[in-house]
Amino acid sequence: MNSLTSNKSILDWLQDKIELLNPDQIEWIDGSEEQLEKLRKIAIETGEMTLLNQEKLPGCLLHRTAPNDVARVEDRTFICTSKEEDAGPTNHWCDPKEMYEKLYNIARGSYKGRTMYVIPYSMGPIGSPLAKAGIEVTDSIYVVLNMAIMTRVGKKVMDVLGDSNDWVRGLHCKVDVNPEDRYICQFPEDNTIISVNSAYGGNVLLGKKCFALRIASYQGWKEGWMAEHMLILGLENPQGEVKYVAAAFPSACGKTNLAMLIPPEYLRKKGYKVWTVGDDIAWMRVGKDGRLYAINPENGFFGVAPGINEKSNFNALESTKKNTIFTNVCLNLDDNTVWWEGLDNNPPHNALNWRGEKWDYTKYDKANKVQTAGAHPNSRFTAPAVNCPCISSEFESSQGVPISAIIFGGRRAKCAPLVYQSRDWTHGVFIGSAMASETTAAAAGAVGVVRRDPMAMLPFCGYHMGDYFNHWLEMGEKLGDKATIIFNVNWFRTDDEGNFIWPGYGDNCRVLNWIIDRCEGKADAEETAIGYVPRPEDIDITGLDMDINTLKDILTVDKDIWTKEAEEIEEHYKKFGDRLPAALRAQLEILKNNLK
Ligand code: OXD
Ligand code: MN
């Protein structure tokens, strides 16, 4: 083994894994293009990946996962802390000893006849004081090639780490992709992740959800920083000043779209522009000046393909035009390119669907997408961040960007107004802790069911959520009078026929402008029972086909609806028992009183 480090903690851990897994060969990933190209060739030869049209999509590959392995598996995701109560009511828990034994029994000997790839990677720019290192061991070339896009990989990571023991252990074993034995396990007390029997990105790219959210949220709690499920964007004004915001939304609320927003023509002409720092994860610390600073620990985008098109997200589409790995999309056999529902209105007539079967586009049935669509509804692109036309010049900044506003949001047909501002940090934490989104017709089950997803971290918080809320409150104390202002947005208010009232997409820039103006004391608002809400005239709707009364409608706070909301929050809070911070219970009482 040509090791890239002499770090004893790493070499000892690897030796254990070699004995457990019994690989035929061991290969360290040094990050060189030469090595990655060699692996691409092997993956193409074995059929693990398909080389796409190199004129239209240079450097792009297609991969198909097993049909039963197409998404994250929350019911098979465990937080293994020594005490059950430390995982909290929102996580599945298993005793670490028991789980290690179970996983080692599954993994034992499973690399026989295979190569063990050792990937040293950094979450965050290499050498940044906000970055952290990990090692992922895998038997999948697909994982290696994806990790090489989503993270910074190679020898430099090991050089910066030196002899330190502060690195996250990650073991991935494909085994036989058996869903019955599929486990995604985090051991936060040991800085360890083990994932077995899956080859789907969200379960096996261990730097992403497993490390950068579940393990990192725990590390942040212990070390005094935050790992959040948030996009980061910079909004440039006509004077050329850029202000940064971080925003958390549950899935299917358009995080990637907001991160890559193109302002409407009226604002573009004035000189407004959005720069993307990240679309999924933010690591945030208090900077030397006392303000909150954020980095995006990732190096690429692992985005959902269906629905992406030139209009909905031009920048995401551009990002996928080279050096991208597509997973479970539709293959156009005529020109060896890719397609997905929502890309355009011209589905390929000669194509293979996401399962690799001949596809008949005329049989597409919206009510049964998994069976009839060309691309799986959760099909993905893994695209390098550098491809993004609006990538921020601060993307590689080792100190991160100063955050002016934190935004929470969800999909609420009637409840939350288009935007409102919290009274202070504690009230903002209350808003985040009660965050919710309504299910849509796109998902199975009843429409309009409210799912509480605090800070959009429900599937990603690596410890007890009551302690997590308390950590947020402590961060507020650290920030003191420099505390970031917290807002809530809701792009999804509907009229009586169920149509969205607010146009969304690029026009969300109008709301971002109000948010930034509020942070600078330049915009007005009205104090209501739930916080500060703009008056209709405070939001610039020039050029929009919307009258001021309609805007007024989506800014209203309906006391009856909010009284019911407060009752539901009370119910939601019961889960956290005595670990729910008293300050949040007090906020609920304030809300109830304000509504009387
Ligand atoms: C994601 C998710 O893939 O949140 O980013 O599920
Ligand atoms: Mn996400």
Image: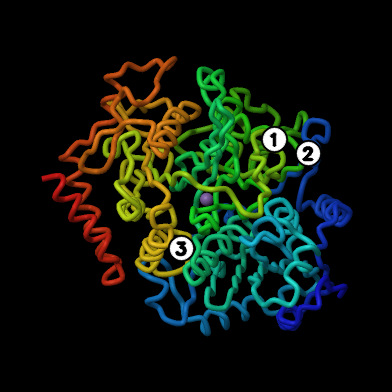
**Amino acid type, residue under disc 3 in the picture:** Cys
Q: Is residue 112 above or below residue 479?
A: below
Figure quadrant of residue 156: bottom right
Q: Looking at the image, which is closer to me, 97 or 119?
A: 119
- With 496 as the anchor, is 154 left or right in this view? right
Q: Is residue 533 above or below residue 327?
A: above
User: In the rendered structure, are the residues bearing label 2 and label 1 in contact, judged by CB atoms less than 8 Å apart?
Assistant: yes
Q: Looking at the image, which is closer to me, 170 or 163?
A: 163
C-alpha distance separating marks 3 and 1 = 35 Å
Q: Point out the tag, 2 or 3, that comes first from the N-terminus.
A: 2
Figure quadrant of residue 101: bottom right
Residue 459 locus on image (x, y percent): 45, 59
Label 3 sits on residue: 461
**Amino acid type, residue under disc 2 in the picture:** Leu
Label 2 sits on residue: 52
Q: Residue at x 51, y 58 (%)?
A: 286
Label 1 sits on residue: 338
Q: Secondary structure at mark 2?
A: loop
Q: Residue at x 35, y 36 (%)?
A: 419
Q: Is residue 215 above or below residue 500?
A: below
Q: Is residue 325 above or below residue 469?
A: above
User: Does residue 18 appear in the picture of this structure?
Assistant: no
Residue 281 locus on image (x, y percent): 55, 52
Q: Point out the tag, 3 or 1, that comes first from the N-terminus.
A: 1
Q: Secondary structure at mark 3?
A: loop
C-alpha distance separating marks 2 and 3 = 37 Å
